[in-house]
Image (cartoon, rainbow, N blue to C red):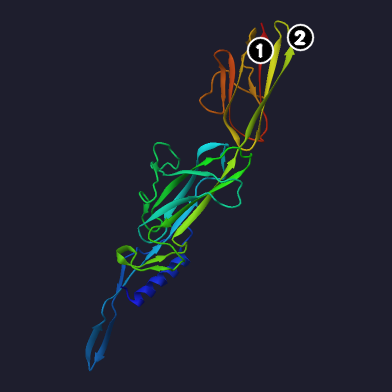
Amino acid sequence: MQSVTTRLCGLAAVAAFALTAGAAHAVGTAAGTDITNTASVTADVGGTPVTATSNPHVVTVAEVIDVDVTLLSIGNVLVNTPSAGQVLTFRVTNVGNGIDSFALSVNNALLGDAFDPVFASVYFDANGNGLYDAGTDTLYSPGLNDPVLDANGADDVVVFVLNDIPAALASGDLGDSELLAASNTGTGAPGFVIGGAGEGGTDAIVGPNGGDDQAQGTYQVSSVALAIAKGSSVADPFGGTQPVPGATITYSLVLTVSGVGSADVTTLSDAIPANTTYVAGSMTRNAAPLTDASDAPTDDADFGVTTPNTVTVGLGNLPAGGPPETITFQVTIN
């Protein structure tokens, strides 16, 4: 059992930790480190120098237990209703001063949102790319592979929380999901001492976050609608507007995106009608000319006049409520 002096020194270390630690990455002397010093005295006794030394005094640094959980997903994660395996991304960091392991859990019964996501699973980022990769990343099994992390913010793990989204939700509905991480050594009020539970048998002292932490992400139901309107104008060889052989038809395709979210990797195509011939170089996007040759594989480019006689344009990612996209091209009547 440690002395009262050592225990008080440990508590003083916690106070210093609380004052100097940032929200995420604490730096402190490693748990179990011995702080040793010896005092000495010299004097002149009757003309003779005399020295004396004290006994070595040893204070062993106690272990501070703490963790930081941070949401990495940017903004609300847009989802459909229903949908499965929607991902929120978090980082779990050990900000204590000793190696520790952490139990993870997910709480979806949060107040203030429109719906509760349905918990599916938790995965660790196995290849370090920060993106969830089905079949590659490691499934978390509570108590079996709790993350073991080095001290002082030097080690962290990226965690993917997968939830299912219920059916019949309204566009714009929000659903919150929270990841919690708790030290397996113990939790409690900051400064709470767990005797002998630290590295090397030192005391473990709960840090400023209480030995556990949580962060919350939000899903937003996205309901995107696409609408396309097609019109045309005719110019005949005689200066009129009659659809006779040799006349030119200019087709206009106007695409609008409404709702919440975005239409991603959008591609528009229109077949050249029978009994007509495409007018080379006549494609435009929002009045800017497009080439007839394919500019694929980019998402936001014209794919050209493809076989069999189809105009295809890649429009990329279009946010709902954005300006309409207008594509035009011409054909002549055979």
Front residue (pair 157, 48): 157
Mark 2 in CB contact with mark 1 (< 8 angstroms): no
- The image position of residue 47, as x and y in percent, is 22, 92
Secondary element under disc 2, as helix, strand or loop, is loop
Q: Which residue is mark 1?
A: 331
Q: Residue furthest right?
A: 240
Q: Residue at x 37, y 73 (%)?
A: 7
Number of residues whose C-alpha sits closer than 10 Å to that of mark 2, classed few (under 14), some (14–19) or many (20 or more): some
Q: Which residue is mark 2?
A: 242
Question: Height in image: 176 above or below 298?
Answer: below
Q: Residue at x 24, y 92 (%)?
A: 45
Instruction: Pick whichever of labels 2 and 1 is earlier in the sequence.
Output: 2
Q: Amino acid at mark 1?
A: Val
Horizontal side of 70 relative to 62 (left or right) equals right
In which quadrant is the N terminus drawn?
bottom left
Give the quarter of the image for residue 166.
top right
Q: Amino acid at mark 2?
A: Gln
- The image position of residue 210, as x and y in percent, is 46, 62
Secondary element under disc 1, as helix, strand or loop, is strand
